[in-house]
Image (spheres, grey):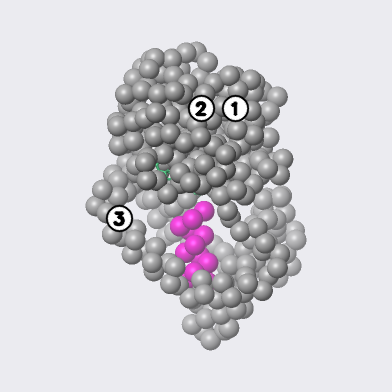
Amino acid sequence: MTAEVFYDDNADLSIIQGKKVAVLGYGSQGHAHALSLRDSGVDVVIGLPEGSKSREKAQEQGLRVETPAAASAEADVIMVLAPDTAQRKLYAEAIEPNLTAGKALFFGHGFNIRYGFITPPANVDVAMVAPKGPGHLVRRQYVDGKGVPVLVAVDQDATGNALALALSYAKGIGGLRAGGIKTTFKEETETDLFGEQAVLCGGASALVQTGFEVLTEAGYAPEIAYFECLHELKLIVDLMYEGGIARMRYSVSDTAEYGDYSRGPRVVDARVKEEMKRILAEVQSGEFAREWIAEDDNGRPNFTKWRQEGAAHPIEETGRKLRGMMSWVDRPITETA
Ligand SMILES: NC(=O)C1=CN([C@@H]2O[C@H](COP(=O)(O)OP(=O)(O)OC[C@H]3O[C@@H](n4cnc5c(N)ncnc54)[C@H](OP(=O)(O)O)[C@@H]3O)[C@@H](O)[C@H]2O)C=CC1
Ligand SMILES: CC[C@](O)(C(C)=O)C(=O)O
Ligand SMILES: [Mg+2]
Ligand SMILES: [Mg+2]
């Protein structure tokens, strides 16, 4: 089935410009949506709890900050960009009491709707504008006149205008410069979780770390292992991004291309594919979602341990030293990117 794709010409920015938007959360996605909407001429208010670390940052960047309840009360469109694990409580305490008929409840990821942690009333629009990229790059691309593609979905269309409103919002954050694909909460949630676990974050990090370990354990210099397994990955992925895997294979040597065909499938073999299918099944059944919410409710013991172990991996120290010598790595991720 071919997806429906929307670009800037398919959306009317004046719709979102005529609404008051509350952005709840001011982290990776929250700051990007809020600043870009503001720069697109939209009336934006930020919702953050008293004592939130993000309050000062939002105010420094010229945005008005209220509590999540007050921001939700005054807004026509409430965009939920707090962590997925915090959204259930945030909804019950601050949003639901202020979610009057005809308002719109927006998400940047479908997790809480897909797995039933949040059930909005039938008289509001429920939609999603989910960028397919990290929030800091969503903002950076907007500032550079470009855009990160977005997925757009409508779960409830109480007003009859939910899709037009979501597309207008997507245009306001620059997403329709690259393209907005129409999808469902189910499809976005399941593909996003699978992608970040098996390929983009989990798969790629494990591949890089394991390649680095194999080379250094065999006695090769960590600096060479870092360049080979991490730094050069970006250059290879840039070629895939520009022209697909075929474009990358055109640019590398025939020796590399032969090694790619003959050795790649030995690394990502049938066992790995079976494991990927198990990971997808855990996403589809809700097993992963229940596990993650329980981990968070329990104070995140595994998450904290794994984060510490990852930060202590020898590749990080090697990378820190080498990146310090690269004058062109001059755009670290910042909230104003
Ligand atoms: N990170 C990304 O690039 C992407 C994220 N998404 C989705 O976007 C959403 C937001 O994720 P992300 O940007 O990573 O989140 P972050 O962890 O970067 O930021 C969370 C923000 O929410 C604030 N916050 C925490 N608790 C509450 C609360 N109870 N009420 C209001 N604000 C709160 C935090 O404040 P404080 O500073 O005080 O902690 C912080 O400002 C999620 O649904 C995620 O799946 C989708 C696509 C990509
Ligand atoms: C790949 C991770 C992501 O899904 C994203 C940046 O799109 C996320 O949840 O942060
Ligand atoms: Mg994603
Ligand atoms: Mg995600």
- Can residue 284 be seen? no
Residue 210 drawn in magenta: yes
**Secondary-structure class at tag 1:** loop
Asked whether the viewer can see residue 13, the reply is yes
- Write down the region rendered in magenta: 200-212
278 and 50: which is toward the camera = 50
Q: Main secondary structure of the magenta part?
A: helix
Q: In percent of the image, x 68 and y 70: which residue is there?
A: 326
Label 3 SS: loop
The single residue placed furthest to the bottom in the displayed view is 219
Which residue bears the numbered disc 1?
A: 42
Question: Can you give x and y, in whole percent of width and height, for residue 57 in the image?
Answer: 51, 47
Identify the mark nearer the N-term, 2 or 1. 2
Give above or below for 284 relative to 202. Answer: above
Amino acid type at mark 2 = Val
Q: Quadrant of residue 324?
A: bottom right
- The three-letter amino acid code for the residue at tag 3 is Arg
Residue position marked by numbered label 3 in the rendering: 300
Front residue of 41/145: it is: 41
Q: CA distance from mark 2 to mark 1?
A: 8 Å
Residue 219, image x, y percentages:
53, 86
Disc 2 secondary structure class? strand
Q: Are marks 2 and 1 in contact (CB under 8 Å)?
A: yes
On residue 21, the disc is 2
- Residue pictured at 61% horizontal, 59% vertical: 332
Q: Quadrant of the N terminus?
A: top right
Instruction: Decide: is 99 above or below 303.
Output: above
Mark earlier in primary sequence (1, 3): 1
Q: Residue furthest left?
A: 298
